[in-house]
Image (tube, rainbow, N blue to C red):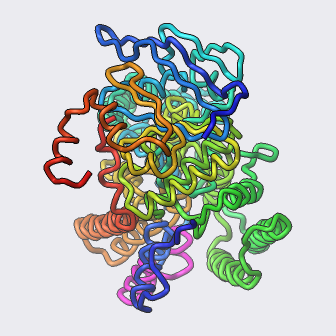
Amino acid sequence: MARPSAPPLLALSGVFKRFGAVEALRDVELEIHAGEVIALVGDNGAGKSTLVKVIAGVEPADLGTLEWRGRPVHIGRPHDAQHLGIATVYQDLSLCDNLDVVGNLFLGREITRIGVLDEVEMERRTRDLLATLSIRIPDVRRPVAALSGGQRQTVAISRALLGEPRLVMLDEPTAALGIEQTAQVLDLVERLRERGLGVLLISHNLGDVKAVADYVAVLRLGRNNGFFDVTTTSQEQIVSSITGASDNAVTRRATREGEL
Amino acid sequence: MSVPGGIGGPTAHGAERFADAFGRKLGGGALGSVPVVLGLLVIWLTFQILNPHFLSPRNLSNLSVDIVGTGMIAVGVIFVLLIGEIDLSVGSVSGLASALFAVLSVNYGMPEPPAIVLAALCGTAVGFVHGFFTAVVGVPAFVVTLAGLLGWYGLMLAIMGAYGTINLDDQGLVAQLTNFYFSNVAAAYALAALGTAAYFLTAWRDVTRRRAAGVPFRSPAEIFLRTGLLAVIAFAAAYVLNQFQGLPLALLIFLVVLVILDYVLRRTAYGRMIFALGGGVEAARRAGVNVAWVRISAFMMSSTMAAIGGLFLASRINSVSQTSVSTDLLMNAIAAAVIGGTSLFGGRGSTWSALLGVLVIQSIASGVALMDIQTAVQFMITGGVLLLAVVVDTLSRRAQWGTRPGLVFRRDHSH
């Protein structure tokens, strides 16, 4: 798969981020194009979440250039990122259990008529949005507490899409989900790509990565440690990039069991 | 590549389906007021069998006025419960406000209207203090309002000072709050008709708009049924009230307050924020809700309503004394909110639970008084009912969680 020649949606280069004595990101670069799913992988503490927070404006970078659609930009706070069209869905679901799907989607940006909530219009837009994403929720008026984990995650992602972003970052969207629920979420990720959005998918699960990502960006100890085309790269190669050596616990284990 | 979404497949047995639907309703809070309405009917029938005067127009009319003071306080408590906090100071604050009113109007000769406003604003200010320490400083509301319970009671004693009891002007505005009745029979019926018509028109307009927008709407049959039920209750109440002295002003004010605050909670962005806080503070914050401000406002609401409730309670006995803060007022107000169906865990409830809950509590008090048994029994019955209500609340919460096994572990992943 050849990468498109148009300027990337988002290009990072030379990004540094330090927390006290810890250098969380060192000279990191990353490019995300529209209509691409980039998986961001790495071991615990590799800097994945920090990178997401840099892009989302939660923890701005100390050093480095960010280019948005070819133009240099500064992302200093979450509002800047949202304004550019970057939406983030964090690992722990950001939903209110007691509110229904409509209430959650529009929380903080309710549609009102003369100061009164316009429930009908909000429900109509919710149905439209869920329908275009082929998300099936039995009843959008049920509290989200009554939904399955996968449905909740799709609601959280749809919520991010209401602002019509161009880039969506998903932080471990399938953690804590069952097999079928994971499939629902991965289906949704594919639909985001079909709609021409850029997707940055943070995941521990290489199975998920192989299933939906186009490219894999590996972080190791805060540095770039490889960028692979998923279709031509084996899982072992990715694993060795993550762990930093071809001789590691994972491959040794695999050799012992003679499976890989 | 689509994946089936629902939980139970079509193969589920009928009984399982029913249990599932029941659990969903319990979980969604759709059962809402059904248990407490049934409970109220049981209480009324029991006392009526024990004492034929219980359901007499005179007793019911008195009941409808007796509920207002505690009911007003309970409405305020509901705001705090909805955001998942607690306010233990409402009894003291209601005493403080009525003492302030009495001293200002009787001892300092201030006209009643500004004295009423000052008393209510005193409640608002107290609520701001509670909210500030809870939302900004971060002290648990339990402790802040416990300090308030003691502190504001002390302030009330200080204000009352040497006056043991202050008798209010029995022609004054506050005295009229619970003493005035619209004796013209047309008033109660007009209110019943107006309420029913307003309900029907609102529901009908909603259906029309939903149909036009292409989203699901209630069937007309359901709306007619609900309106009919409301009409029966409203006109029966009007009939009973007219058998005694007519429509009490206090009840009218209480109902108007309930309708307005219900509207604020369910139909405004502010109300949505209140519910959001009860369902997930972090989610609300990420959605851009000003969490601190909403918290403070809920405490202000609670203390303001406590102050207003205090004025109604003072009106009922036409005086304010150092013993105005009875120990069970606080417990009754919170119990009323919870018995009526507002969750102690936050995020679920409605202003109408104040009406239903306080009806239950006052009915027990009234029935026990009619039968001339000791108040000891009243406390025990009320305690039992409260426990039952909290059990229902807890079970419905568990049912909600039970449909989603993953949730329990949701917050446990390390980043």
Task: State the residue lying farthest toward the left.
Answer: A256
Comparing A19 with B379, the one in front is A19
Whether residue B28 is visible to the viewer of this picture, yes or no, is yes
The quadrant of the picture occupied by the C terminus of chain B is top left
| Residue A246 location (% of width, % of height) | 25, 32
**Side of B254 where A241 appears, left or right:** left
Q: How many marks?
A: 0
From this view, report whether residue B41 is shown above or below residue A192.
below
| Residue B180 location (% of width, % of height) | 65, 58
The quadrant of the picture occupied by the N terminus of chain B is bottom right
The magenta-colored residue range is B38-63
Q: Residue at the location (41% across, 91% down)? A: B13
Comparing A34 with B135, the one in front is A34
Comparing B145 with B345, the one in front is B345
**Side of A242 where B239 appears, left or right:** right
| Residue A233 location (% of width, % of height) | 43, 41
| Residue B61 location (% of width, % of height) | 56, 71
Q: Residue at the location (52% across, 27% down)? A: B125
**Dominant secondary-structure state across the stretch colored magenta:** helix
Whether residue B306 is visible to the viewer of this picture, yes or no, is no
Verify whether residue A121 appears in magenta.
no
From this view, report whether residue A126 is shown above or below residue B235.
above
Q: Residue at the location (49% across, 82% down)? A: B55
From this view, report whether residue A37 is shown above or below residue A29.
below
